[in-house]
Every structure is written in structure tokens, then in C-alpha cells.
Image (cartoon, rainbow, N blue to C red):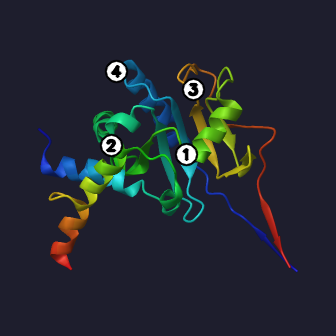
Amino acid sequence: MADTVLVVADLARDLIEAGRTLIRKLDSRSVRFDVAFWLMDPENGSWRLHLGASSVRETGSLALYEKVDTILTEMGFGVRFWIGMVTIEDLRSKLVQALISKLGSAESVDGTRLDYATVNGVRVPPCVLYRLSPEQPVGAGNASSPRRRPSSKATRHAAA
Amino acid sequence: MLTADRQIKLEWGKVSAWRIEMRYQLGVSKADAAEFVRVIAGTQGSLTWLTQYW
């Protein structure tokens, strides 16, 4: 019998903070995304910042990529945090809908981390949340480091 | 007017967000899908550029 422990690559703390800064700057320029979170790709351990807006359905996402890139370039992270690490999407994916339905009505989710949680039947790869509804504040001084939801758990696979 | 480099960078952002599961995602809007096809296969698209070098 062999055990395989799934190793979760951690998201660097400065990138978590940089994502928060980006969202606040976007908010201040009236580019307000309804949802925002980092999500790990389980296949390669890389992280992408997911920004969701309902307007993508009508207008596509390229114009929003341009606005995000303008601010990212100003922030000066270079290739460490660039537009190629950002996914701009509408709100219809199963994962986004599951997160919104479970946590979208919370007062704040900023800094919440989920590790392979199952939310409304959808398995969610490791993620760090900033916002799951337009009303949720980001960077109100309550989220200097990720906090884990009590219901989330690291996954341990056992193979016979 | 965007420079060619910036245009490529932005379009790469959109292209690189594609994941295999998206083939099964329902409800993708016509506007978003058409934009995706354009940045891949349009006259300035990534695939169009790439095919010049293979």
C-alpha cells in the first residue's frame, strides 16, 4: 500500500498582496470586477489570478485585459506578475458559480484560502479569495495573510 | 492605438487563459467566443503568426 501526499505549491505572499493592490487600483479607476481570486492549476502548480465580470458576456474580455495590463505595468513586477498570469472571465463557470453561491453573501472573503475544498459538488483547486460579490471589500486591513476556512482541507490520496 | 507588442501581449493573456475543460463549458457568449477566435486565427492572431515559422 502506498500513500501519495499531494503537495500544494504555495502562492508567494507578495503576489497575494500584489493581487490585492491590483484590485484596489482597478476599483479606484471604476474597473470593478465582481469576483477576484488566485487559483492554482493542479496540473503544473502554477497560479493565475482570476477576475470575473458579467460584462464579458456582452463585450468580450480583451478591453478589460488592456485595463488590467496598464495597472500591472505601472506596478512594475515584470514577468513575476504579468498579464499572462491573469484570466478574465464571465461568471458562468461551474467553479465561479459554486464559490459565489457558497461565499458570495459573506461580509468579506478577502484573504480566505481553500485547499481542495468541495463546494456545492464542485472540487475547487487551491485558491486564495479576494472577492466573490461586488459588495465585498478588498484590502480593508483585515487580510495580511491567508486564513483557511474551517471546512477546507489538504487532500491526502491513498492508493492501494 | 496599441503597439504591436502590446497587442500581442494582451491577446496572449486571453489565449493563455484557455483550459481544456472549457471545451465543455456551456453558456459562453457569442461576443467572447468570437473575440477568442479572432485573437487565435485572425489576420493578427497567434496561430496565424505561429504558422509562419513552422
Rendered view: A47 above or below B41: above
The spot of residue A144 in percent (x, y) is 61, 30
Which corner quadrant holds the C terminus of chain A? bottom right
Evaluate whether residue B43 shows in this view: yes
SS assignment at label 4: loop
Q: Which residue is mark 3?
A: A133
Report, in whole angstroms, how far the alpha carbon at label 2 lies from the one at label 1: 16 Å
- Marks 2, 3 in one chain: no
Q: Residue at x 22, y 70 (%)?
A: B50
Letter of the chain that mark 3 sits on in the rendering: A
Tell me if label 3 and label 1 are in contact, CB under 8 Å. Answer: no
Which amino acid, by three-letter code, is at mark 3? Ser
State the image coordinates of residue A109 (x, y, percent, origin top left). 65, 29
**Callout 1, which amino acid?**
Ser
Q: Amino acid at mark 2?
A: Ala
| Residue with the mark numbered 4 | A29
Distance from disc 2 to disc 4, alpha carbons, whole Å, reads 24 Å
Q: Which corner quadrant holds the N terminus of chain A?
A: bottom right
